[in-house]
Amino acid sequence: MYAQLARKALGLTWPVLLPLLAAAVLLHNGAGVQSGGLSATLPRLFLIGAIALAWRFNRSRIVFAAVAVWASAEASLALPAGTARGAVAVCMPLTLAIFSLVQERGLLTPIGLARWGLLAVAALGVMSLRQADNAALGRWLTEPVFPLPWMFHPGLARPGILVFLLALGVLTWRMVTSRSPIDTGLFGALVGGAFVLHTPGGQAERLVYLGAVGLILLLSMVEASYTLAYRDELTSLPGRRALNETLQQLGGTYTLAMVDVDHFKKFNDSYGHDAGDQCLRYVAARLAAVGGGGRSFRYGGEEFTVLFPGKTLAESIEHLEDLRESIAEAKFAIRAQGRPKKRPEKPSKPGPIKSVSVTVSLGAAERDPDSDDLCEPHAVMEKADKRLYKSKKDGRNRVTAKGC
């Protein structure tokens, strides 16, 4: 279980961990880290690349995050230490937290223009702190807000650090709950931006971390593009394209099982398409947890595929039976039809929650490298599909691995 959680965490956060680790290694070795030349140009090129890619794929939150961190970094590099930098340390995490909570609405839409306005107001506020009239506010931004116990560093109570911790909580929650590469990119922009603003090093070190932020946003866009192409949007399982490419890369022995939700059309007719989607997500969650090294894919409609690389049919059948039983024995609650998206001022008394169970039928076949009839992926899939229909013909809620 812990290994599975670790793999999920790594799969979610690698676009953040890889650039930050590379920046730490580069700074530790100290080779080629300068404040001018390519070292100054490359971080900005990363950010321009992230902005261009996000604009092309209509991911406005990445655009605004890149602009916010870039502007904060330039201000941190240009302004002397003190009140202005303290204001930047407050504005950057605050704007990123706000951007993470707003859905994609384009760059020049009313909401997009409002976000540009927020960046402009933040920039004007930072510049105004250079005036002597705002000295009191400047001191508040650079001094601890309240005393901390002796074991804590007093600098942790500065407004910039407190706002950063608040934004970190918001962005962590968004990343974990949505598991979206875009939210991961925003989380990484916040962490990398904090290194840019708070690193004790000089301009060269800040540029290295700025480059890490640009790379984080670029990798997040790459991951988002991969998800769009290879992941099913409804169930979050790998889709048919991912299955086809995986099968082309496999050699030797493997077992493939076709899975179909029983009476799904009747389920849709009885409970509605929203409940049907809920049912598919429920089944997909069970399929994603299949044991024995199995990998699950959404084939299309109510059909799924489970693949066991390197496993014979005899080695896989037990895990398929466990999968079938786990789906059949569990129940899930169907959300009420016509449920409003927003909570009404006077909510009506909720009706009884209906719990239902679903079953699946499975047909499995093994690739035999020594057989001309069961060597190609399409032949193995066709054999598994025939056995799936035998399972349905024989009464459903069963696994068929022989015959046909």
Image (cartoon, helix red, strand yellow):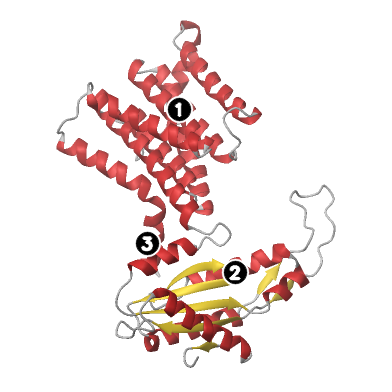
Q: CA distance from mark 1 to mark 3?
A: 32 Å
Give the secondary structure at mark 1.
helix
Dot 2 or dot 3: first in sequence order is 3
Question: Residue 132: percent from the left, percent from the top?
Answer: 46, 6
Q: Are marks 1 and 3 in contact (CB under 8 Å)?
A: no
Q: Is residue 342 above or below residue 261?
A: above
Q: Is residue 168 left or right of residue 367?
A: right
The residue that label 2 is drawn on is 282
Task: Identify which residue, 6 or 310, lies in the foreground.
Answer: 310
Q: Is residue 336 above or below residue 385?
A: above
Q: Is residue 155 left or right of residue 277?
A: left
User: Given the image, on which type of amino acid does mark 2 rest?
Assistant: Tyr
Rendered image: mark on residue 7: 3
The residue that label 1 is drawn on is 67
User: Given the image, on which type of amino acid does mark 3 rest?
Assistant: Arg
User: Given the image, on which type of amino acid does mark 1 rest?
Assistant: Val
Give the secondary structure at mark 3.
helix
Quadrant in the picture for the N terminus? bottom left
